[in-house]
Image (cartoon, grey):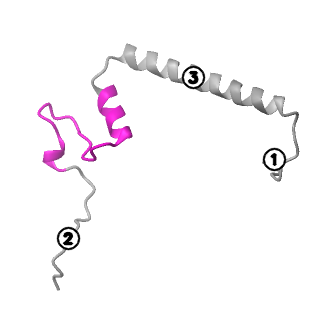
């Protein structure tokens, strides 16, 4: 029975039109941040990728320190949350 809707194929493999002229994969979603990041990194040199990873790590460590400082300033105020240690 055909209800007029297009059928989906079970294959998740990219079609030939999802590759650009150099044979690299291009994300078919217009504003996909993961696809954009992967296609940008794919074209970059390893030194640039290493530099960006180190910068991202430093940024996340700074954010962690900021959050921990803010928590320490509250003096461990009572919350409705309970910490459960998993060994």
Judge from the rendering whether residue 42 lies leftward or rightward of residue 3; answer left or right.
right
Mark-to-mark CA distance, 2 and 1: 48 Å
Query: Helix, strand, or loop for circle 2?
Result: loop
Say whether disc 2 or disc 1 marks the residue closer to the N-terminus: 2
Residues marked 3 and 2 touching at CB (< 8 Å): no
In the picture, measured across the screen, residue 69 lies left or right of residue 30, that is right
Frontmost of labels 1 and 3 is: 3
Percent across and percent down for residue 34 are: 38, 39
Image coordinates for residue 3, horizontal then vertical, percent: 18, 81
Please say whether residue 25 is one of the residues in the magenta stretch.
yes
Judging from the image, what secondary structure is the residue with disc 3 in? helix
Percent position of residue 75, x then y = 88, 33
Q: How far separated are the C-alphas under marks 3 and 2?
A: 45 Å
Residue that badge 1 annotates: 85
Q: Secondary structure at mark 1?
A: loop
Q: Which residue is mark 3?
A: 59
Q: Nearer the viewer, mark 3 or mark 2?
A: 3
Camera-near label (2 vs 1) is 2
Could you classify mark 2 by the number of other residues whose Cα lies within 10 Å: few (under 14), some (14-19), or many (20 or more)?
A: few
First along the sequence among labels 3 and 2: 2
Observer-nearest of 15 and 40: 40
Which stretch appears magenta? 15-41
Up the image or down, 20 lies above or below 58; here it is below
Q: Which mark is residue 7?
A: 2
Residue drawn at x 48%, y 22% as measured from the top left: 53
The one nearer the camera, 84 or 33, is 33
């Amino acid at each position: 029975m055909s209800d007029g809707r297009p059928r989906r194929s079970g294959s998740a493999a990219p079609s030939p039109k999802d590759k650009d002229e150099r044979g690299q994969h291009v994300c078919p979603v217009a504003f996909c941040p993961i696809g954009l990041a992967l296609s940008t990194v794919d074209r970059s040199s390893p030194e640039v990728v290493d530099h960006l990873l180190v910068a991202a790590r430093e940024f996340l460590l700074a954010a962690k320190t900021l959050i921990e400082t803010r928590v320490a300033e509250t003096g461990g105020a009572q919350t409705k949350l309970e910490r459960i240690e998993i060994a």
